[in-house]
Structure formats: structure tokens, C-alpha cells
Image: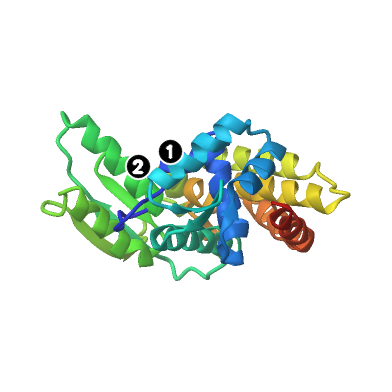
Amino acid sequence: MEVVEGPVVTRRQELGAASARSLLLTVLGEFVLPDERPVWTATLIDLLADVGVAEKAARQAIMRTADSGWIEASRVGRETRWTLTAAGTRLLREGTDRIYGFAADDRPWDGRWLVMTVGVPENNRALRQRLRTRLGWTGLGSVNATTWVTPRVDREPEACRVLDELGLTIGSWSFVATAGRLGDERSLARTAWDLDAIERRYEDFLELVGRPRPRTDRQALVAQIRLVQEWRRFPLLDPGLPRELLPPRWSGNRAAEVFRERHAAWAPRAAAAWAELARRH
């Protein structure tokens, strides 16, 4: 993700374990953002408790999120309620679009590749790591230490912004090309991305989300939070390759179907439980 004005979510925050702050972001994006109304501290603490977050950790997550500029407080008597800031609203909308757009992304591929060559001094390991993280987040994979590729050529502007922000524009080149006679494009994809590791993550996701059978609205609310929390990592792990480059019976296809099915089934009940919870506090 490119740097934007205001607060940003780091790749580490997105891909790390289900921390209190990460779960809070999921709740904010799923329920507070579309509701467009302030939410009480007690509501957030109550719901986070249902997904295993202790009250102290929940309060710390709320305060850290406020310190980051994503939410702001207003006092009503002795109670506090929270509203998304403009920056927080923008960031959560971008995240929501990425999550649901990724689940539905089945664009045809025209056979073209974006190829970028980027030179970084070998002794600057910190810069090399930042480049790897940022370009990886943009969806590019590395063939070697200097060459990055993606079959999604529309990602060139975002990738160029990354290079500009890292001071690596001079001495770098980008090309849009089709494959020649040498080599196999599926092998290229496996060189640039660890598709086996990504597929294992999808299989873990399918095993995890296949278990819940919520009987009550509140259980559906909790199940939806866990579903979205697990799914939100995949747009950052999976480069979204066209099917021509994927292994046969790619688990990501089934995982996307299951995500859409579960979310559609649980969303109305989860929304009802959220509305009831918000009214109680």
C-alpha cells in the first residue's frame, strides 16, 4: 500500500496475529463504518470480549487507534463514544474495497506483464527490506534481487509511487511486455511468489471457517468478525494472479466462494445483533 496523507495500516498490522487492535479495525470497518454513527466504548469492549480480547487490551487498542488518528472521542456525561475521523473513514473504505474487491476479482488477463528493474545498494539491507515489503504489498513478486514482475500491468502507477517515495526512481526501469520463446510463465509465477505457502493459508482458512454454525444473531456477529478478520489478510498475501498462471484446483478459488457465501449468510443476522448491542449501551 502506498503512503497516503494521514494514518496508514502497516503490512505487519494486517498480517500479524489477531491482535486486539487488528480485531478492533475489523469491527470498525464492518459495523461502525457503514452505520455512520458514533459507538460507545462499552459497545466495543463488550463485542471484543466475545472474540477473546480482555478489557484492558480492548481499552489499549481503542486508545492506540485514537492516537493513530483513526477515531476521535466525545464525552457524554461520564461515558465516551467514538467517531471515525475523515482519515480513518478513508482508510477503512480503502481496506473494505480491497477485501471485497479481491474476493470478486476475476478479470481476464491479456497476457502482458509489468516488469520492473530496481537497483538497491547491497549494503543497504534496510532499504532492500522496505522495497520488498512495499512492492510485495503492491502485488509484485521478485524474480531476483533486482527484477520485479506482475501480470497486473495496472499496478504500475502504484509501484512507481513506491519507488519515488523510497528514492529509487533514478536507475530503475519499467516495461510492459509479453512472454517470448524461452521459459514457462507458470514457472515464472512460482519463482516470483511462494504459491504453495499461500495455498496452505487458504486451506487453513477453509478448515477454520467451515466449522461455525451460528444459532443466534450474536453468534453470527462473532462468526462474521472472525471470518473477515481471517480473510482480510489474503489481499496482502495473494498477488491475485490470473487463472492461467495458477496451479490446477487452486484453493484460493474455493476460499473466495466460501467467504462470499458465509458473509452473505451471516451479514443480516450480524447487523441485527450489532444494532441490538449498540442500543443497549
- Tell me if 201 is positioned left or right of 123 in this view: right
Q: In the image shown, does 276 or 118 lie closer to the viewer?
A: 276
Q: Secondary structure at mark 2?
A: helix
Vertical order, 100 against 23 (above or below): below
Locate residue 110: give its quadrant.
bottom left
Amino acid at pointer 2: Thr
Query: Residue shown at 68%/51% (left/top)?
Result: 255
Q: Is residue 133 left or right of residue 232?
A: left
* Displayed quadrant of residue 38: bottom right
In this picture, residue 155 sits left or right of residue 125: right
Residue 232 rendering spot, x and y as whole percentages? 56, 50
Which label number is shown at residue 115? Answer: none
Instruction: Give the x, y percent position of residue 202.
Output: 63, 44
C-alpha span from label 1 to label 2: 9 Å
Mark 2 = which residue? 133
Regarding residue 264, the answer to whether it shows in the image is: yes
Count up the numbered dots: 2
Q: Of tags 1 and 2, which is closer to the observer?
A: 1
Q: Residue at x 47, y 48 (%)?
A: 236
Foreground residue, 74 or 244? Answer: 74
**Label 2 neighbourhood size at 10 Å, few (<14), some (14-19), many (20+)?**
some
Q: Mark 1 = which residue? A: 12
Q: Amino acid at mark 1?
A: Arg
